[in-house]
């Protein structure tokens, strides 16, 4: 049965979508079959991979108008795309019975087809995020190594703890990903130290360094491995994926 992972941070610009795409692509490079779910109404993941508008998106699936219809990006990498219409889904589903479990039910028929299902959550802690966490085995928290990125960490952990208590007993914080790291900057090093004090061994050893190729790849509608596999961005995400597999195999 495939593992389901949510990438969550209610602050924008922390590398959440970049990490979702490149963790997915990195796992494919390591021989895994991966499905990416774009659950953000901004649809940045869908745009970054150049996915053409599909008749049925995650929005139609959540509304019960279709099943999940993955779009094949390349061998062993599929995506369920998002749309701006998704921004109205929380209000439209507010009176649905079991509304926090809609996404989990949608995954059931296809979960065995993939090694990993990875969800790019919206930058909010509303119903869409609750659906993602309710369906997930692990939640990963990307954190930009800047001072303001530390604000709200307690709130994120509080939400995860509540979901674990009320909706999904199996949910675990699988790891914290430090992004946009520059070892030359004292602030970046200090933020990583602070994150490690707060989350301990949950912080991945791999630091995602600030790298122009990671910013350029979406403009070419590619993941980092298809765009520039010799870049430090590709090296970092490959190391992170290996660390993810090691942790999951160790049951962490």
Image (spheres, grey):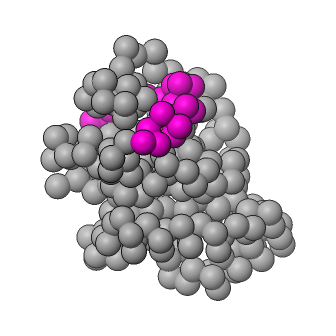
Residue 217 appears left or right of 245? right
Residue shown at the point (53%, 37%) measured from the top left: 91
Q: Nearer the viewer, residue 94 or 126?
A: 94
| Residue drawn at x 64%, y 61% as measured from the top left | 143
Above or below 247: residue 77: above
Number of on-image labels:
0
Q: Is 19 located above or below residue 177 in the figure? A: above
Q: Residue at x 70, y 80 (%)?
A: 193
**Residue 200, position in %: x, y?**
55, 84
- Which corner quadrant of the image does residue 71 belong to? top left
User: Is residue 131 inside the magenta stretch?
Assistant: no
Span of residues in magenta: 72-95
Residue at 48% of width from left, 74% of height from top? Answer: 161
Q: Residue 148, position in %: x, y?
A: 80, 63
State the quadrant of the N terminus.
bottom left
Q: Does the rendering let one see residue 37?
A: yes
Between 83 and 3, the one nearer to me in the picture = 83
| In the image, farthest residue toward the front | 95
Closer to the camera in the image, 209 or 96 = 96
Q: Can the viewer see residue 183 in this picture?
A: no
- Check if residue 79 falls in the magenta segment: yes
């Amino acid at each position: 049965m495939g593992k389901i992972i949510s990438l969550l941070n209610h602050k924008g610009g922390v590398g959440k979508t970049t990490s979702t795409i490149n963790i997915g692509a990195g796992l494919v490079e390591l021989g895994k079959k991966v499905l990416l779910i774009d659950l953000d109404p901004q649809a940045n993941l869908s745009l970054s991979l150049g996915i053409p508008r599909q008749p049925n998106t995650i929005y139609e699936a959540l509304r019960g108008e279709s099943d999940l219809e993955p779009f094949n990006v390349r061998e062993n990498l599929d995506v369920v795309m998002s749309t701006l219409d998704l921004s109205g889904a929380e209000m439209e589903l507010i009176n649905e019975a079991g509304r926090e479990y809609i996404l989990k039910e949608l995954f059931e028929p296809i979960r065995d087809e993939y090694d990993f299902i990875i969800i790019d959550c919206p930058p909010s802690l509303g119903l869409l995020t609750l659906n993602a966490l309710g369906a997930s085995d692990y939640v990963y928290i990307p954190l930009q190594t800047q001072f303001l990125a530390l604000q709200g960490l307690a709130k994120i952990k509080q939400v995860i703890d509540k979901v674990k208590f009320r909706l999904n007993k199996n949910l675990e914080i699988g790891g914290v990903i430090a992004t946009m790291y520059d070892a030359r900057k004292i602030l970046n090093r200090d933020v990583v130290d602070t994150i490690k004090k707060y989350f301990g061994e949950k912080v991945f050893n791999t630091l995602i360094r600030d790298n122009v190729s990671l910013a350029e790849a979406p403009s070419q509608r590619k993941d980092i491995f298809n765009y520039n596999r010799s870049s430090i961005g590709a090296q970092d995400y490959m190391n992170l994926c290996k660390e993810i597999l090691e942790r999951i195999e160790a049951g962490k």
